[in-house]
Image (spheres, rainbow, N blue to C red):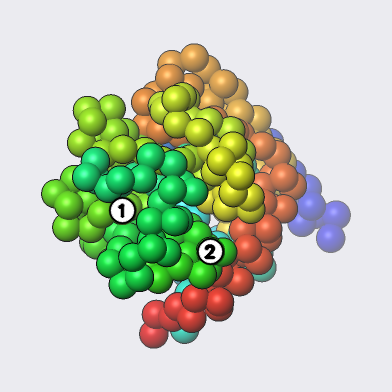
Amino acid sequence: MWLLSGVVASSAQNYPSRPVRVVVGFPAGGPTDVIARVVAQKLSDNLGQQFFVENIGGAGGNTAAGQVARMTPDGYTIMVVSTGFVVNPSLYAKVPYDPVRDFAPVTLVAVSPNVVVVNPQVAAKTLPELVQLIRDNPGKYSFAGPGVGSTPHLGGELFRLAFKLDLVHVPFTGAAPAIQATVGGHTPIAFTALPPALSAVQSGQLRALGVASTERAAGLPDVPTFAEQGISDQEADTLTGIVAPAGTPKAIIDLLHREIAGIVAHPDVKERLTTLGFKAVANTPDQFGARIRLEMDKWGKVVRDAKLRIE
C-alpha cells in the first residue's frame, strides 16, 4: 500500500509529464468549447505541456461523459462540462455515467445567467407584465429554447410551473435559431443563456425583461433580475466547469484548481469571459461538488414536475 501511495505521489509531483486531453462534449465554436480552449491554452503555457481540446459530440454531452468516466484517473484526461452534465441523468432514460460517483470535481470555471427576451412587438416591459399577458391570453404564447433539457428550456419550465401558465416550449437545434425565431416574431418569447442573446438585445431586435440570477449581468447592467421584480427561486445559471475521472489523485486535482483559479483571475481572461456573457468563478473542488449535487436536485425536480423524458 505504501509503495502504491508513493507511486501516486510521485506521478502527481511530476504532473504533467506528457500532453493532457481536454474533452468537450459539444462541437467546436460554442461557449463551452471557447472557454475550454482559453483555459487549455493558458494551462499549456503555465505547465509546459500541451493541454489539447478534443470535441466528442453526441447525446447532449452524454457520449463524451461516458467515455471520460471510464478513462484512467491519472490527470491526463479531463473534461469541460456544462449544465447538461448534471441535468441529463434525470432527463434521459439511460446515461452512461453518474456525475457524483464517476467524476472528481476540479472547479466551476464560470457561470452565465439565463435571460428572458421578447420580440419588441410583445407589450410586456417587465416579467410581472409578461405573466399577466400570458394569463390574459391562454393558448396564445410560446417560448423558444435551444433544445429539450437545456438550461434555458428548464428555466422556462420552472417559470411556467411556478405561475401555472399556459406557455408552450418550442425547441430549436441550438441558441442561434431560437434567437432568430424570436427576432422574427415566430415565437414571441425566448428563454436563453445570455451570450447568444447579447447582440440582439443591444441592437434593439429583442427586449430583455429579466435575468435569472442573484445579481445583474455585466453584459446587460440595465436589465433587472427576477428577484428585483418580486419573483423568487428562479435562478438558472448555465455552468461551465471542469471534472476528472473519479480517483484522480487529489494532488493533481488541487494543482489544476490552483492553476485555473489563477487563469480566470487574469484580466484578459476575465474580459474574454465577460464578452462571452460569463462571470468567472473558479471555486474549490469541494464547492463545485456541492454545486453539482444542488443542481442535480433542483433540475431533477423540474424535469419530473414537467414530465420531461428523452428515451
Q: Is residue 255 visible?
A: yes
Please name the residue shown 44% across and 80% down the image.
309
Element type at marker 2? helix
* Residue at mark 2 to residue at mark 1: CA–CA distance: 16 Å
| Quadrant in the picture for residue 56 | bottom left
Q: Which residue is mark 1?
A: 189
Q: Quadrant of the N terminus?
A: bottom right
Residue type beneath disc 2: Phe
Q: Nearer the viewer, residue 8 or 305?
A: 305
Eyeballing the image, is 72 above or below 37? below
Q: Which residue is mark 2?
A: 163
Say which amino acid is labelled 1. Ile
Per the image, label 1 sits on a secondary structure element best described as strand
Along the line of sight, which residue is nearer the eye, 221 or 6? 221
Q: Residue furthest left?
A: 184
**Quarter that holds the C terminus:** bottom left
